[in-house]
Image (cartoon, helix red, strand yellow):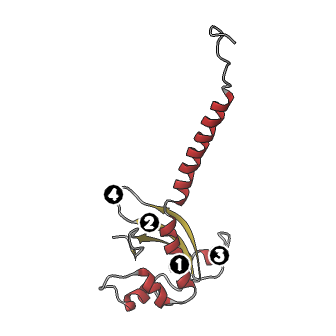
Amino acid sequence: MTLLDPPPAKPEKSRAIAFTVVALAFAAAIVLYFVFRYYPEKRAADQFLSALVAGDTERAYQLWKPNPSYHMSDFLADWGPNGYYGPVKSYKIIKEKSPLGVSAVIVTAEISPYSPMPDVSDAEKSRKTRVVELWVDPKDKSFSFQP
């Protein structure tokens, strides 16, 4: 090999593979972000609703982290066995979202007084299924209703 000979050609294949790997990693990171971005709030809602299903209203009240004006009697009027949303025997979390300008994550769940969750084809039982929006504060995982 002399000075005037051109250098050996580098294979372009390795660069294409590297770019492909980087692009796939970037796409996977974006997908994982959108799938798991509200996971802590969804998990908090799952724990709260599981406590209600188990009949542990004291634990559910603690998980709610109420402000001083929302007493246990108020909580039972909403979530207790004879409350507005109760009794909760089964639930299904439908979606989570955080609209622009809202500092909370809204977890939408179906709650039912029947166990297991009734099928849509069972009109009588599914008629009693309610859809509730729980507002979860991302900072301390406290719950509230829509303001």
Label 1 or label 4, whichever lies nearer to me, is: 1
> Who comes first in sequence, dot 3 or dot 2?
2
Screen quadrant of the C terminus: bottom left
Q: Earlier in the sequence, mark 3 or mark 1?
A: 1
Element type at mark 1: helix
In this image, 42 relative to 123: left or right?
left
Q: Which residue has dot 4 on it? A: 101
Q: CA distance from mark 3 to mark 1?
A: 21 Å
Q: Can you name the residue that lies furthest to the front here?
A: 2
**Amino acid type of disc 1?**
Gln
Q: Dot 4, how many residues are within 10 Å of its Cα: few (below 14), some (14-19), or many (20+)?
A: few
Badge 3 amino acid: Pro
* Contact flag, marks 4 and 3 (Cβ < 8 Å): no
Given the image, on which type of amino acid does mark 2 rest?
Ile
Q: Look at the numbered disc 3 and give the secondary structure of its residue.
A: loop
Q: Nearer the observer, disc 4 or disc 3?
A: 4
Q: Looking at the picture, how far across and down is residue 77, in whole percent? A: 42, 88
Per the model, the C-alpha gap separating discs 1 and 2 is 15 Å
The residue positioned farthest toward the left in the image shown: 69
Could you say whether the residue bearing mark 2 is in a helix, strand or loop? strand
- Can you tell which mark lies on residue 118? 3
Pointer 1: residues within 10 angstroms few (<14), some, or many (20+)?
some
**Mark 4: which amino acid?**
Gly
Position in image of residue 56 (x %, y %):
52, 90
Is residue 109 shown left or right of residue 20?
Answer: left
